Amino acid sequence: MARFIVRRSLSAIALLFAVSVVVFGIFEVIPSYNPARAIAGRNANPATVQEVSHKFGFDKPVYIQYANTMKLIFTGQVIDYQDDLNVVDQFAHKFPVTLSLVIPAALLWFGLAVVFGSISALRAGKFADRAVMVGAILGVSVPVFLLAALLLYVFAFKLSWFPNTGYSGLSNPTQWAYHLILPWIAIAALSIGFYSRVLRSSILDMSTQDFVRTARAKGLSGGQVFRRHILRNSMMPIITMFGLDFALLLGGAALVTETVFNLPGIGQYEAQAIGNLDVPPILVGAMFTAFFVVLFGAFSDILYALLDPRIRLTG
Amino acid sequence: MAERLLDVESLKVTFATEDGLVHAVDDVSFTLDRGEVLALVGESGSGKSVTVMTLMGLTRSPNARFEGSARLRGEELVTAPDEKLEKIRGREIAMIFQDPISSLSPVMRVGDQIVEQIRAHEKVSKAEAMDRAVNLMERVGIPRARDRARSYPHEFSGGMRQRVMIALALSLSPSVLIADEPTTALDVTIQAQILQEIKDLREQSDSGVIFVTHDLGVVADVADRVLVMYAGRVVEQGTLDEIFYDPQHPYTWGLLGSVTRMDRNPPHRLPAIPGLPPSLLNAPVGCHFRPRCPRAFDRCTEVPLLESRVEGTPEHVDRCWLEVSEKRRRREVEGRIGLAAGTVA
């Protein structure tokens, strides 16, 4: 276990380094990119731009610029070029919003996917199965921005069951949930469909295994066979998917939902930064995502090893 | 007379597939008494596994149809509701499966798998069930059973895994023990050990054993009575001696002829039965063995009844139209019983 943690940590460091270099490098080769101009303001004269460029070190060689930026990031002093705000503070401020959005949505989609996938597999070929599968295809194929807009239109605008947009802090849990229910549904819909389909086929596959036949031959009831032998072994594929999807969403992949519902989370912040070609937030965001991908990759590997004793943890 | 455990009568199992109806088991009847070992012999796909799995209701599915009856001490199994079968499975009828690596759950400790079976049928504490599981494992020759109960199946060798499987099957002292090719996946020395284990168990308990195999060497070793199946039908049934020394059906001759024997001079070439078993989707009219049988004649397009044809042995039945004297003459090949692709009589 210690060895596993050390090896994963080393690979995380290597990945963060690679991601930061690539992101930093991209902005070096973008033709019209000139951060000094952005900082100096719209009507700055060339002399001012020159001055800014010198002050921020944009006239220095790339690797020095990179080293300086990294130093600023890891000392928590990095500021964005657009608004002169501390990027790390911004992340700290916006991350709770993203967490509030993603964690309940993830629980929702994982739980419902297990329920729907199981129903679908147990009733394979029957009406319930078809209904679930049609729903799944709808969920997978409707784009998030459309679904989010539809939810807003129907439930917030027409029926007024939920507030229009916006975020309310966790200090008032009722208001918090009230504001977030529609965004949760918008995020979960796609994954519920996808996960339940994957789980369904995994369950059907597992049901024909010899050890499931043995479980029946032991005299276990249908429910016991399903819970103890089929379902547990069928979870692997969706656990892998879950680790990755969850990490990406925490890193800002929920940007469409955050934008439509006007939730000031990481995704929205990142989207704005990309629109402004604002390197520091983009860089921090990319590293943030990479960090979560490594972290949750390790978590799902640990979960694997717990679920299946044949799997050994390797770095 | 020993107690009659199983009474199977005209059992038919039909599966509806996309390509049509498959008559996997076609009119199979047999009985099993206490303390008896019945061998079910036949090639892959002859319906032997489907027959025994049907007894436990393991072949039930929306596209399977069952006819006939199978009674356990008078209680009907074929039409029994699932809840009733669940009580019988594992407790009254237990099964040792062919491939012990895939037949044990890979993610459960072996002790827990045995405990699970005990607790499915008896209200005992986990600790008590575990003590029994450890005793069972010791009984089937697993050393350091207390420690080994905490291991997973992949941490056992093939032979040890099959011992676990046997311990599992024996955990509730079932009256009927079904062994479905229990030694097929094992190497020969382990096979011998496992067979010895099963023979010992039969002496210690008085359960009836159904031994499914295609290995006649194994049959000669363990069986009291033999049932030969071909393409879903019983083609011959009798005591071990009747089947081995006076086989009536050409398919049985072929099976016997294709066995290597240590006690005779080896034949020129080890004979095989020509051709392939028929597809059960489109079985030949009449005797199913007809297309592969060098002794086939006109009458074979009519399904032969399963009846006693040898005088004085009413229990020895077969499905072949040939005269007994004719059979006895024709089955000699190079000084031993076999099926020669020779001139048709």
Image (tube, coloured by chain):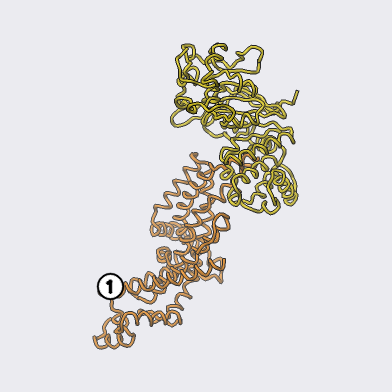
Chain colours: A orange, B yellow
Q: Position of residue B134 (x, y in %)?
A: 71, 48
| Kind of element beneath mark 1 | loop
Quarter residue B167 falls in: top right
Q: Position of residue A213 (x, y in %)?
A: 58, 40
Q: Is residue A147 visible?
A: yes
- Which residue occupies the foreground of this view, B24 or A274? B24
Q: Position of residue B215 (x, y in %)?
A: 57, 31
Q: Which residue is mark 1?
A: A30
Q: Is residue A120 visible?
A: no
Tell me the residue at 42%/63% (across/down). Answer: A257
Tell me the residue at 44%/32% (across/down). Answer: B18
Q: Position of residue A189 (x, y in %)?
A: 46, 55
Residue B91 drawn above or below residue B46: below
Tell me the residue at 56%/47% (across/down). Answer: A230
Q: How many marks?
A: 1
Indicate left or right for A22 with A225 as reference.
Answer: left
Tell me the residue at 57%/29% (across/down). Answer: B261
Image quarter in which the N terminus of chain A is found = bottom right
Residue A124 drawn above or below residue A101: above
Indicate left or right for A153 with B152 as reference.
Answer: left
Quarter residue B13 falls in: top right
Q: Chain of mark 1?
A: A
Residue type, label 1:
Ile
